[in-house]
Amino acid sequence: MSHEWQLRKRPVCMERKYLFDAYDALRDFLDRVADLSEREEYYPDMSFGRTQVTMTIHAPEGSEEMPEPLHDFARQVDALYSLKDVSVNPVQE
């Protein structure tokens, strides 16, 4: 998991901001995260603008620590971000 995730204690959560050069790259990332969320059955809180996404992963209510499966989810999101320059829908001529 990237060191860019900020761990919070109250409430227990992790937050990270992802930056993009273009809106199309941001949309591709959001689509990939949506697919991951469907597979993992976990849906993080996200807010976004034209070139940035802020993601918050919350621990289950009453937890005092972030469970390992959610750390794994964050690592998978980081891996998707590393693909930000790879187009999901290449232009076809």
Image: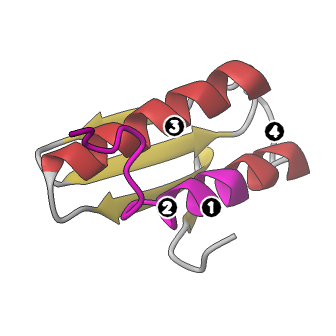
Q: Is residue 87 visible?
A: yes
> Which amino acid, by three-letter code, is at mark 1?
Ala
SS for dot 4 = loop
Contact (Cβ within 8 Å) of mark 3 with mark 4:
no
Q: What stretch is highlighted in magenta?
A: 74-93
| Of marks 4 and 2, the one in the foreground | 2
Q: Label 4, label 2: how many angstroms apart (C-alpha)?
A: 32 Å
Contact (Cβ within 8 Å) of mark 2 with mark 1:
yes
Q: Label 3, label 1: how many angstroms apart (C-alpha)?
A: 10 Å
Q: Residue at coordinates 71% horizontally, 39% vertically from top-left?
A: 59
* Residue position marked by numbered label 3 in the rendering: 32
Residue furthest to the front: 93
SS for dot 2 = loop
Q: Label 1, label 4: how many angstroms apart (C-alpha)?
A: 26 Å
> Which amino acid, by three-letter code, is at mark 4?
Ser
Mark number, residue 79: 1
Q: Label 3, label 2: how many angstroms apart (C-alpha)?
A: 10 Å
SS for dot 3 = helix
Q: Is residue 90 magenta?
A: yes
Nearer to the camera, 42 or 83: 83
Q: Label 2, label 1: how many angstroms apart (C-alpha)?
A: 7 Å
| Of marks 3 and 4, the one in the foreground | 3
